[in-house]
Image: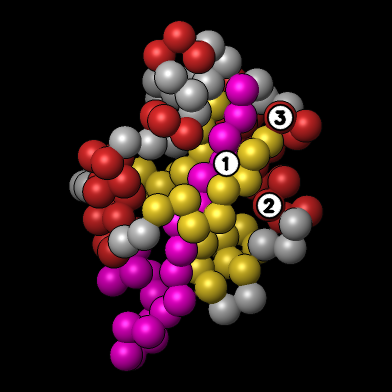
Amino acid sequence: MKMHQNNTGLAAEQLAATFLTNNGLKLVTQNYHCRYGEIDLVMKEAKTLVFVEVRLRSNSQFGSAGASITTHKQQKLIATAQHYLQTHHTTSRGDTACRFDAILMNKADLNSIEWVRNAFDA
């Protein structure tokens, strides 16, 4: 985990993991880091690997939580996910089903979670 990440951000990630687990997904890893960036949560839903970006925006002055997942951020997430697949996934044909989801919150509370499946494509 990043040393500078605040407790509210960590709480949001934990809430997101709990929410997704309660909705049938299985936590694979949290805060995966590589040289390309970080993925907050890697989950599994049936045979699909789900890369999850958690965004908490308590102040919308600079845009919504969803709007903060810019094209540049998406590119970093895709590169990080590709690195994860190359180093951690063992399918020989590279046919792993994957998707990118987003968990959006305006406060760190289970009732404020918006789950966006397939938030963007690789």
Question: Is label 1 in contact with label 2 (beta carbons under 8 Å)?
Answer: yes
> Where on the picture, by quarter, is residue 25?
bottom right
- Dot 2 crowding, Cα within 10 Å, few <14, some 14–19, many 20+: many
93 is within the stretch colored magenta: yes
Task: Please provide the residue range marked out in magenta.
Answer: 84-106
Question: Would you say 63 lies left or right of 28 here?
Answer: left
SS type, badge 1: strand
Number of numbered callouts drawn: 3
Q: Residue at x 78, y 32 (%)?
A: 111
Q: CA distance from mark 1 to mark 3?
A: 10 Å
Q: Secondary structure at mark 3?
A: helix
Q: Vertically, is 74 above or below 88? A: above
Q: Is residue 58 left or right of residue 83?
A: right
| Label 1 packing within 10 angstroms: few (<14), some (14-19), many (20+) | many
Image coordinates of residue 105 in percent, x first then y, are: 61, 29
Q: Earlier in the sequence, mark 2 or mark 3?
A: 2
Is 49 left or right of 34, judged from the image as shown? right
**Quadrant location of the C terminus in the rendered image:** bottom left
Residue wearing tag 2: 20
Q: Is residue 42 visible?
A: no
Q: Quadrant of residue 85?
A: bottom left
Q: Amino acid at mark 3?
A: Ser
Q: Amino acid at mark 2?
A: Leu
| Residue depicted at x 40% and y 14% | 62
Q: Which part of the image, by quadrant, shows the N terminus?
A: top left
Judging depth in this view, the residue of 65 and 92 nearest the camera is: 65
Label 3 crowd bin: few (<14), some (14–19), many (20+), radius 10 Å: few
Q: Is residue 26 above or below residue 97?
A: above
Residue shown at the point (63%, 76%) measured from the top left: 46
